[in-house]
Image: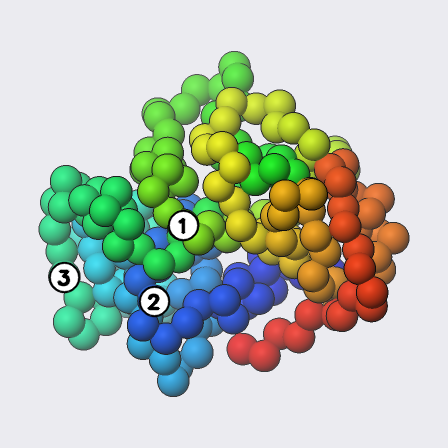
Amino acid sequence: MLDKFGIAKRIAQEVKDGYYVNLGIGIPTLVANFVRTDIEVEFQSENGILGMGPFPFKGEEDADLINAGKQTITALPGASYFDSATSFSMIRGQHVDLTILGAMEVAENGDIANWKIPGRMVKGMGGAMDLVASAENIIVAMMHTNKAGQSKLLKRCSLPLTGVGCVKKIVTNLAVIEVTNNGFKLLERAPGVSVDDIKAATEGSLITEGNIPEMVLTI
């Protein structure tokens, strides 16, 4: 079973040379720390930066340099800063190759709910709805179940939707799963996790074909 850092490491393997990548708040922000050093990747944040680097070491934080989640970050050589309108032009213009988001729920048809729990105060959906409406490649980073042990990979989302039919792949603490026309397809198991464990934790339809390999965290 993976922790949040393991999830980020596995997703980092999906990042390819030359990609422009947007990282959502939560687990996705950790991905920048685990990208291979032999490839060039530009991380974009909708609050107005292209060229984000890893999180700063303690004592080296710059309070004026933050990501969309208000966390202090670093900037790589050549990074650029711009206003929100320009940032969302990049997103809506489909200039981002990969979007990595957290989620509270994902449905077997690729619907995602990640911005609001009814009855709880939220400031708004942020850039999430623009990201899911514009991105062609969305990977979700999430825990497979909630704190009560209930599945977060569902037949149908119960929370207000952020986007419809947009998620392509999900990496959880238990598995790597692809969203297909027939439901969730199990691609890899987390270390020490069985197929039966994943089936028990998944409410939506789960397709298992052949021998499901255990994921290898190479980064």
Pointer 3 with pointer 1, Cβ within 8 A = no
Q: In the figure, 96 relative to 15: above or below?
A: above
Q: Earlier in the sequence, mark 2 or mark 1?
A: 2
Residue farthest along the right direction in this orientation = 196
Q: Is residue 35 left or right of residue 8?
A: left
Decide: few, some or many residues near mark 1? Use Cα within 10 Å; few <14, some 14-19, many ≥20: some
Viewed as shown, does residue 100 lie left or right of 110?
left
At mark 1, the secondary structure is loop
For label 2, the SS is loop
As drawn, the label of residue 19 is 2
Q: Of the two numbered discs 3 and 1 on the same chain, state the one appearing first in sequence.
A: 3
**What residue is drawn where x is 34% and y is 42%?**
134
Disc 3 residue crowd, few under 14, some 14–19, many 20+, Cα 10 Å: few
Percent of width and height locating residue 203: 76, 36
Q: Which quadrant of the figure has residue 192?
A: bottom right
On-image quarter of the C terminus: bottom right
Mark 2 or 1: in front is 1
Give residue 79's quadrant in the image: bottom left
Mark 3 — residue?
80
Q: Give the image location of residue 36, x and y in percent.
A: 44, 78
Residue furthest to the front in view is 181
From the image, which quarter does the N terminus lie in? bottom right
For the question of whether residue 5 can be seen, the reply is no
User: Rounded to the nearest whole Å, what is the CA distance between mark 3 and mark 2?
Assistant: 16 Å
Three-letter code for the amino acid on which mark 3 is drawn? Ser
Q: State the residue at coordinates (46%, 60%).
A: 30
Looking at the rendered structure, the kind of residue marked 2 is: Tyr
Work out how far the residue at label 3 is from the one at label 1, CA to CA, in angstroms. Answer: 24 Å
The residue under label 1 is 136
Residue occupying image coordinates x 52% and y 14%: 119
Q: Nearer the viewer, residue 162 or 27?
A: 162
